Amino acid sequence: MSDLRELYQDVIFDHYKKPRNCHVLDCANHQADGFNPLCGDQLTVYLKVEHGVITDLSFKGSGCAISTASASLMTEALKGKKIDEVEDLFEDFHHMVTTPEDAPHPELGKLEVLAGVSEFPARVKCATLAWHTLQAALKNQNQPATTE
Ligand code: ZN
């Protein structure tokens, strides 16, 4: 198990150092800002939604390793997904990061590298910030999303 944990940390570190889809998305038709006051993480999520499908998405911001890696992994996981699927995925993801020793989550794919967050309750909001912001963007809320 410890080897697996190290691997997971490598993936998180890699996404922190080289975040994927980390740029302003010029063609976005949804966007929202998110802020996690507990840690100081802030980011903007950009989405291009066509016919109920997320055809492209990106984020930009500054935050800790967990929030950045989670945003990076989320953008990779959700590209090409239907908006209807997002709610379920977020529910599974949220359950995973808040439930220590939870069952495996094959449906979450690479997002599973963040399962270790469940052992650090203070970091849950870092891991979920991008998702809360994504939901705000889908609803086109003008109020910045906050984890509080
Ligand atoms: Zn953080």
Image (cartoon, grey):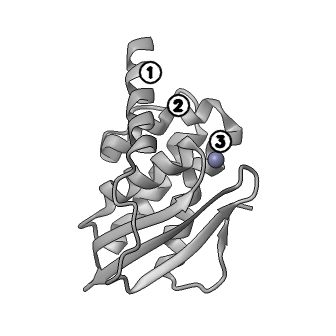
From this view, report whether residue 85 is shown above or below residue 90. below
Give the mark count. 3
Could you tell me which residue is drawn at 46 percent across and 46 percent down?
69
Residue 104 in the image: state x and y as whole percent: 39, 32
Mark 1–mark 3 Cα distance, whole angstroms, equals 17 Å
Q: Nearer the viewer, residue 74 or 10?
A: 10
Residue 90 in the image: state x and y as whole percent: 47, 57
Residue beneath label 2, please? 116
User: Which amino acid type corresponds to the residue marked 1 in the rendered image?
Assistant: Arg
Tag shown at residue 5: 1
Residue beneath label 3, please? 123
Mark 1–mark 2 Cα distance, whole angstroms, equals 8 Å
User: Which amino acid type corresponds to the residue marked 2 in the rendered image?
Assistant: Gly
Is the C-beta of the residue carrying label 3 under 8 Å from the nearest atom of ligand 1?
Answer: yes
From this view, report whether residue 11 is shown above or below residue 74. above
Residue 40 in the image: state x and y as whole percent: 71, 54
